[in-house]
Image (cartoon, rainbow, N blue to C red):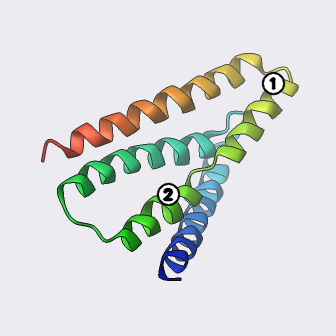
Amino acid sequence: MDKLLAVAFGGSVGAVARFLIYYWMERAHEGRFPWASLMVNLAGSLLIGLLWGIFDKFYIPSGVRLFIFIGLLGSFTTYSTFSFDVFSLWKEGEFHTALVYLLGTNIGGIGLAFSGYYLSRMF
C-alpha cells in the first residue's frame, strides 16, 4: 500500500507541475509548435538520467524511487500528448514541424537521459 501511495502522490505532483508549465508556455509562446510538450519531455528525460546516476551512488528507498520515477516524472512527462501533437501536426499538413518535433523529442530525450546520467557520475 505504501508503494501505491508513493506513486499516487508523485503522480499528482508531476501532473500539477506539467499543467503549470503548459499554462506558462501557452501564455509565453503562440504558434503551432508544441513547445510545452517538448519542454516537459526533455526536462523529464534529463532529470531521469541525473537522478538515476545519483541513485546508483547512494541508497535510496524503493518508495522514494517509485515516487520520483514512476509517479512524479512518469506523470510529468507525457507520451500520449506527444503522440497527439505529432498526429495533429501531420493531419494538418505540417509535415516538417511534425518531423522536427518527433525527432527532437526522441533523440533529444534519449540524449538528455544519457547526458544526465553521465553528468551525475562526474560528481
Check disc 1 and report the residue beneath it: 90
Give the mark, 2 or 1, whose residue is nearer the N terminus.
Answer: 2
Residue depth check, mark 2 versus mark 1: number of the one nearer the observer: 2
Residue lying at 61% horizontally and 40% vertically, measured from the top left: 35
Residue lying at 58% horizontally and 23% vertically, measured from the top left: 103
Dot 2 lies on which element?
helix
Q: Amino acid at mark 2?
A: Leu
Check disc 2 and report the residue beneath it: 73
Q: Position of residue 58 (x, y in %)?
A: 19, 61
Q: How many tags in the picture?
A: 2
Question: Distance from label 2 to label 1 (Cα)?
Answer: 27 Å
Which residue is the extreme one toward the front? 1
On screen, 93 above or below 41? above
Please name whichever residue, 113 or 5, is drawn nearer the observer in this view of the structure: 5
Query: Local crowd at mark 1 within 10 Å, few (<14), some, or many (≥20)?
Result: some
Q: Amino acid at mark 1?
A: Trp
Residue lying at 63% horizontally and 49% vertically, measured from the top left: 78
Q: Position of residue 108 (x, y in %)?
A: 47, 30
Whether residues under marks 2 and 1 lie with C-beta atoms below 8 angstroms apart, the answer is no
Q: Does residue 29 appear left or right of residue 83 in this picture?
A: left
Q: Does residue 93 appear left or right of residue 24 in this picture?
A: right
Dot 1 lies on which element?
helix
Query: Local crowd at mark 2 within 10 Å, few (<14), some, or many (≥20)?
Result: many
Which residue is the extreme one toward the bottom? 1
Q: Which label is found at residue 30? A: none
Please name whichever residue, 49 or 16, is drawn nearer the observer in this view of the structure: 49
